[in-house]
């Protein structure tokens, strides 16, 4: 959710690349899938194989919510069976939901979405695509505690068991990557319980490929409030939205 407004809303990566001194692409809390993909070759990793093919770059700097929901729904639906059927795009989903608000918030220089809006737009997308038989469950930890860490690990472990559900995350991207300070949305691709780390399937593909981060770091990223320079998103904290298996 890189919000590219004219003045203070400029993102940290843009500023960094304009300066003489640069810094590594990922900080100490993120490891690229290119550097470490052993888990994906030794574990079933059903979510990775179901969702990774459908994760596409967000079509604007503010479109991480629509990009993530589109990837999640495509992964749950799978590849269309017939040659005449297309794979749903971000613009397709915006058109189906018919939400001028979501379209405006996702446009270039858009404000991006709050967690409550993210939840509402996910529900609208489920209705628009005829997937109302799947429950949508939002969760906001509020604070990083032993109890919320346990709860997050359970969400991730349950999700890792099959590709019948999807977990989308709203988090402060910079806590994980060491870059800009602001809210962002992406999709969970795998949970390596033995190493207590999670694979984030990035839709912010102008800057990143998928990366691993420790679960406690992800929790910290969820509960860090958006700073004042994020405008209408100031104070926003994140969490997860689980799209469940059909009921």
Image (spheres, helix red, strand yellow):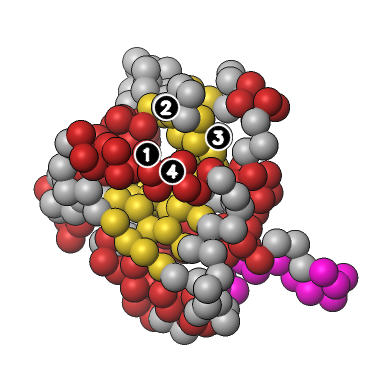
Q: Label 2 vs label 1: CA separation?
A: 8 Å
Q: Is residue 100 above or below residue 178?
A: below
Q: Secondary structure at mark 1?
A: helix
Residue pointed to by mark 3? 209
- Could you say where residue 58 lies in the image, as x and y percent from the top left? 51, 54
Dot 4 and dot 1 residues touching (CB under 8 Å): yes
Answer whether residue 196 is magenta in the image.
Answer: no
Q: Earlier in the sequence, mark 1 or mark 3?
A: 1
How many numbered circles are shown?
4
Residue 153's disc is: 1
Which one is closest to the eye, mark 1 or mark 3?
1
Can residue 3 be seen? Answer: no
How far across and down, in percent of the image, does residue 71 sit? Answer: 57, 58
**What residue would you read off at disc 4?**
156
In the rendered image, residue 22, in percent from the top left (x then y), is placed at 38, 18
Q: Nearer the viewer, residue 164 or 62?
A: 164
Residue position for label 2: 196
Task: Name the N-terminal-most of marks 2 and 1.
Answer: 1
**Would you say residue 92 is visible in this rendering?**
yes
Q: Which residue: 23% across, 42% down? A: 148
In the rendered structure, which disc, 4 or 2, sits on the residue that comes first in sequence?
4
Relative to 229, does residue 196 appear above or below in the rendering? above
Left or right of residue 175: residue 22: right
Query: Which residues fall within the magenta stretch?
Result: 81-94
Q: Around disc 2, counting alpha carbons within 10 Å, would you say few (fewer than 14), some (14 to 19), or many (20 or more)? A: few
Task: State the image coordinates of residue 145 (x, y, percent, origin top left).
Answer: 17, 36
- C-beta proximity under 8 Å, tags 2 and 1: yes
């Amino acid at each position: 959710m890189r919000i590219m407004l004219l003045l203070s809303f400029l993102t940290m990566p843009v500023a960094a690349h304009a300066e003489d001194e640069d810094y590594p692409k990922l900080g100490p809390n993120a490891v690229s899938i290119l550097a470490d993909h052993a888990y994906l070759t030794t574990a079933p990793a059903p979510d990775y194989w179901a969702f990774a093919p459908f994760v596409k770059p967000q079509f604007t700097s503010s479109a991480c919510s629509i990009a993530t929901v589109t990837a999640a729904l495509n992964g749950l639906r799978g590849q269309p069976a017939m040659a005449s059927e297309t794979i749903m795009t971000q613009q397709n989903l915006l058109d189906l939901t018919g939400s001028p608000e979501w379209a405006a918030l996702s446009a270039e220089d858009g404000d991006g979405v709050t967690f409550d809006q993210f939840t509402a737009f996910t529900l609208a997308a489920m209705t628009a695509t005829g997937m109302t038989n799947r429950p949508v469950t939002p969760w906001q930890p509020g604070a990083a505690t032993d109890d919320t860490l346990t709860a997050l690990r359970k969400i991730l472990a349950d999700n890792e068991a099959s590709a019948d559900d999807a977990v989308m995350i709203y988090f402060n991207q910079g806590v994980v990557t060491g870059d800009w300070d602001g809210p962002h949305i992406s999709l969970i691709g795998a949970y390596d319980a033995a190493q207590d780390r999670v694979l984030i399937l990035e839709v912010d593909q102008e800057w990143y490929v998928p990366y691993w981060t420790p679960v406690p770091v992800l929790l910290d990223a969820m509960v860090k409030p958006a700073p004042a320079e994020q405008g209408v998103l100031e104070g926003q904290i994140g969490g997860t939205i689980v799209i469940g298996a059909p009921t």
